[in-house]
Every structure is written in C-alpha cells, then in structure tokens.
Amino acid sequence: MTLRCLESFNIQGRSAIIDAMTADPCDLIVIGGGITGASIFRDAAQRGLRAALIEAHDFASGTSSRSSKLIHGGLRYLKNLGFRLAWESCHERNLHVRLNRRLVKPVPFLVPLYRHEKPSRLSMRLGMALYEALGGLRNHRFHRFISREETLLLAPGIPVTGLSGSVVYYDAMVNDSRWTIEVVKDGVRHGGLALNHAPVTQMVKSAGRICGVAATDSIGKREFTVNSALVINAAGVCCDRIRALDDPAASPLVRVSRGTHLVFRAEDIPLNISTVFPSRLGGRSLFLVQRDGSFLYGTTDDWTDDQPDHPVPHAADVRYLVESLEAFMPECAPVLEKVRHVYSGFRPLIAQGSPGRSPSASTRDDLIETSQAGLVTVVGGKLTTARAMAQRVLKHVAPRLRPQAPLRPCATATTPIGGDNEQVAEGLAQWVRACPKLADYIRILFERYGLDAHRICPEATAIALGRHPDPLAEPIRAEVKYVCRHEMVCNVEDLIERRAGFLHWDAETRIERLHHGARMICEELGIGAEEFQNQVAAYGQYLATFHAIPAG
C-alpha cells in the first residue's frame, strides 16, 4: 500500500493541492468533509475518477465528530417500522466489524428487564430475533438473556426492585472523527484531492448548468476555481447553504435535530457493561457506553433553530440527561458534579414529512436531489450507512459521469481501510516484539492508523529504548509528527480535537497537552510562538463555548 499521495497531505502542501485541483477539470467535486462527503470521495477515487473533496472547516468538524460514536443497526427503528433502514444498518455494521475491526469495535449492551415495566421480556425476545434476522444472522454474537444475579454482577448500580433479569446484545462503536479522517485519507491514497478550511463561495455556471465551484483557502488566503462535470453537495446540516449558492429560492431540504452527550469517568458510574435504559422523564431510550476509560452518556433528540455550525449544549438538554440518570440510578447523584465533558451535535434530517413528528420518529433515510442546474445534493442518513449512501450516490450520477461506459464497480464493500485485519495484526506483533514495553501504545497506534503505524513506530520505539538523539523526547512525539505531516492538520484545534483527542480528556488536560508539545507543534505547523499562543487561546474559547456545562 503506497503512501505517496499522503506525502503532501499537510499544511505545507496546500498550495500544491490547489494547483492540482485547478490544473485540469475534475470528474466530480464533493462539498463537505463529514463522513458522507468523505465516503463519496473515497468511493469515487477508488473507481478511478478524478475526485476533489472541499471542506469549509476541518474534516469531521461538524456532525461527524459529535455523534453518539456508534455503528449500530438501529434497534429503535423497529418501533417505527423502519425495517429497510434497520436491515441496511445491520448489514453495514456487520460489514465494518468484519472488514475494519481495528476501527469498528463490537460492544455488548445490557438492557435490564423489570416486572410490569417496558420493555417486557416477550417484546425483547421478538425484537431481538427480528433485529438479528435483519442482520442476516451474521452478527458478531447473538443476544442472550441472563438472570437477575448475572445482571447485578454486570450492572451493580441499577435498581434492584422488580428486576427480573436482562438481555445482552451486540452493536459496535467507533471513534467518529478518526473514522472520517481515515476514509478521507483512503480517498487521497487512491489519487483523490482533498482540502479542508476552504469554504465554497460560488457555483460556477455555463449556459445555466453548474460546471465548477469557486472557493477560498482560509489558511493561505487564496481564492481558486475548480472545474468539474459534476458537483455533489454533501455538506450535512449546512447543505441548504450550498443549495442557496445555486438557487437562492430553493426550499429547505434539511431540518436540524440537536443531540447532547455527557462524559463521565468510568469509576463514577457503577456499571461494568454498556447499558441501555428508558428515561423516566418521557420514555426515550438512553445509553451509557464504556469507552476510553469513560462512560459516554446520551442522547437527547430535539428540533432546533440554532445556527447549524454552532452546536452549543443547552442547559435544558443537560438537565434532562442528569435528571434521567438520577431517576434511574439514584446512587449516582449528584450527577452534574461528575460530568467531565459535554458536547452537542446536529443531525441533518430530511425536512419532508417531519412537521409534527418528534426527531426520534423522523426518518434516518437519505435523499438524493438534483437541481435544475445540475447540483446533486444528498441529505439525511447516518454514520453507520455512509458507505452504502456513497454507493447509491455514485450509481445515481454514473450516467452523467461516464455516459458511454460504465463506472468501475464499487470496491468499498471489500476493501479495508488502512490494511486488512491480518496485515494489521502482523504489523502490531512485529513492533511489540521489537519493543515490549510499548505494547499497549503500539496496539493503540495500529488501531488508529492501520498500516500507517509503520511510519510512527520506528521513532516511537527508538525513544522508548533510549536510542533517540533527544533524551527528553516522548513516544507520542512520533505520532504527532505523523498526523501533522500526513493528515492535513492546519491548527491546534484540528490536532487536539479531531486527530489526537480522547473522549476522556477534559478541557484542562487538552490545553496542558498543547503547551507540553508547543515546540514540536510549532515546528510541524510552521508557526511562531506568538501564533501558537493565539491558537491555543482560540481553542480555549472553543472549549468554553462548545464543551462547557451551560449555566442553568
């Protein structure tokens, strides 16, 4: 697997990437660097198309870094008779668990069952049988019912009164921002051109048809125009803004729902397994997911009129989550004092058919629209089904791209991202043998970067074994250098929030990490000490705005 195309995928290579985008017409331009746009970009590049991906901010900086971080079949869709979506979601989940195990991890969920309360044991038996059948009976593991005693061993903090047992079933989790970045990188490896921090400002038209876009490089302050036979709008919650560049009178396609999540230290939640329970403040299903030494708790689901690029947590959402958890597990109170991190994200749902419906009851299906001028917009969908959505989009636009000959077949269902499971396992074993003291960190590197970890491990192990010229260097230095040089990191927020960030890092820890690596970060990003301090201050304000517990 060559890394050649990633050698210039960095802040120093932006000018060359823009030059390549503008030198010759592209086959297609994808606007939006979330998981939907990234998946379309990757699919197109794998099929040999000249594809460009343009993102206004950073890759995954919107919904795709603020999700529930689950690759799941959508058990609750069955209540709304969403069998087609559940079928596709289950199949995509099973595909990624098999194909991309380093990134998509199966995780058990416990659902406690109480006498005379919903869900009943019968409804769970029927629901689980249907859920696993929709997945083609190819689940990582099948569900099982366990006794009251086993339930309390796994979840000692749940209420005891009326408890009759529980059911354990499997879905999967993922680091959503890492998942998105890896998908973008795979598109770049296959010859695609990708650029972040480059908002599209205009649709270029000829004879009333869109033939390209004008954009601005926010980093280099350069305006440029990319010509293309096709433009695909995959801007998520901001897609109506892009549609307005084509037709200012276009009616909205997207309605926005806000979901809020809280993060706790694992030791503050008396559970030994991820758990799903219905809120006693309305019945909505809530979850506590174990990951990164923490519990991720959520989520709310409310219509919002907030600006789509400002997902600020609302006090009412936090209060709902806190009161729901205290009602379910009173011994956790006071919950608010234990919250380590908070974030909100927006879901781009299809506006058609949503008036009068709650967000939870609104469809997670996707919709493809083509405007009179030829702009193709894809909206809706979810993290789990992004690969399949991309395949549908490419099928939809194929007649316009290659009218005389068919496109290459889609390969994303058979091609792993960053190396297959066996190659990743062999690489991991090789470096653990070379440096056993770094075994845990090497495992993390291969999970995050796949075979790209071979670019990080030589320096990391040299540091750990005392063979590095800088006696004060730490192994993470090699990882930071890699992401800055091969993952288009443009500022400290990109680095700490979406490339190297952990779910359990609180605001103070994130700022401390930046100051600790100041000299190397400045070298890699080509900035001085004053600019570094300005960026850290801006990131501190970002944390205070988007990750602080709201007053009230």
Image (cartoon, rainbow, N blue to C red):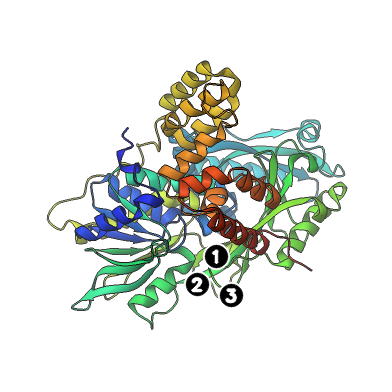
- In the picture shown, does residue 195 fall above or below 467? below
Q: Quadrant of residue 241?
A: bottom left
Residue located at (33% from left, 76% from top) = 246
Q: CA distance from mark 2 to mark 1?
A: 8 Å
- Regarding mark 2 in the picture, which secondary structure is present there? loop
Q: Position of residue 32 (x, y in %)?
A: 41, 60
Q: Identity of the amino acid at label 3?
A: Asp
Q: CA distance from mark 2 to mark 3?
A: 17 Å
Q: Position of residue 164 (x, y in %)?
A: 80, 39
The answer to whether the residues at label 2 and label 3 have Cβ atoms under 8 Å apart is no
Q: Which mark is residue 353?
A: 2
Q: CA distance from mark 1 to mark 3?
A: 17 Å
Q: Identity of the amino acid at label 2?
A: Gly
- In the picture shown, does residue 427 fall above or below 99? above
In this rendering, does residue 72 appear at all? no
Toward the left, the furthest residue is 404
Q: Identity of the amino acid at label 1?
A: Ser
Circle 3 crowding by C-alpha within 10 Å: few under 14, some 14–19, many from 20: few
Residue identified by numbered label 1: 362
